[in-house]
Image (cartoon, rainbow, N blue to C red):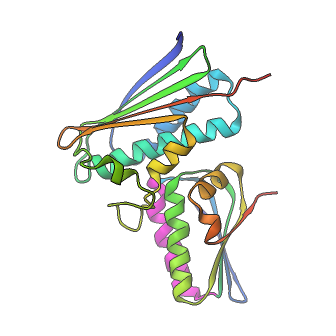
Amino acid sequence: MKELNSLKLEFPSRSINEGLARAAVAALCAQLDPTLDELGDIKTAVSEAVTNCIVHAYPDVIGTISLRARIFESGEIEVTVRDRGVGIADIERAKEPSFTTGGEERSGMGFTIMESFMGSLRVRSTPGRGTVVVMRKRLARRV
Amino acid sequence: MITTVQNDGGRLVVALMGELDHHAASGVLAEISARIDLALPRACVLDLSALNFMDSSGIAVVLKAYRQMRELGGTVAVKRVPPQPLRVLRAAGIDRLVTVEPLE
């Protein structure tokens, strides 16, 4: 699979950077000429993944979030979001709709939205070491 | 984030603009909650027509307003919703809980 372009970003887990991460991935993704819906879906999924790092991975400290995005000739985009935070002990539970440890400001729908808006979602996590989320989506061929 | 608040005849209309993510949500949540407490409306309408982006943080905002209005015996409606926020609300099934009307 031929890679067309890629980006790497590292930023502190401050909530103001949620918009930065979305905008950077959207700008890269725009090179694949996505539909507005596709672009909106990708921005939403990135926002959810980065917010999870800020709220859950680093609840009491400012840590580093690493983001990597790649676009491929096949029309696929891959986004990897990595943190070195607290980790997730039970990933299946964390993915359940409406399950949240984030209080009333969170809806517990983050993973559900990542899963339904992207083609695939993989989560690897080690408690005390951090979490890696890899999301892929293939854009529809434009006629 | 909150552009206008109108309160006429027991109907509180709160219009949002910009990007509603986790960064913006806590301020919006507190502001809407305070407005409902102050106005004690029968209906609360969230107008999203000027919202450029919303993630699941917006779902928490709608749910909080829904719970608060339910305690008052009132209703919540989310109106003039652009396509991207609409996809998020529908993915979460919010349209089964409150009235959600797309932007025309």
Quarter holding the C terminus of chain A?
top right
Q: Is residue B32 magenta?
A: yes
Q: Main secondary structure of the magenta part?
A: helix
Task: State the image coordinates of residue A84 (x, y, percent, origin top left).
Answer: 24, 37
Residue A101 image position (x, y, % from top left): 32, 61
* Residue at the far front in the pictured view: A92
Image point (58%, 28%), residue name: A27
Residue at the spot x=46%, y=46% of the render?
A48
Q: Looking at this view, is B75 or A19 the one in front? A: B75
Against B75, residue B87 (above or below) is above
Q: Residue furthest left?
A: A128
Q: Quadrant of residue B8?
A: bottom right
Can residue A59 be seen here? Answer: yes
Residue A3 highlighted magenta (yes or no): no
- From the viewer's side, name the closer residue of B13 and B63: B63
Instruction: State which region is magenta.
Output: B22-41
Q: Is residue A35 left or right of residue B57?
A: right
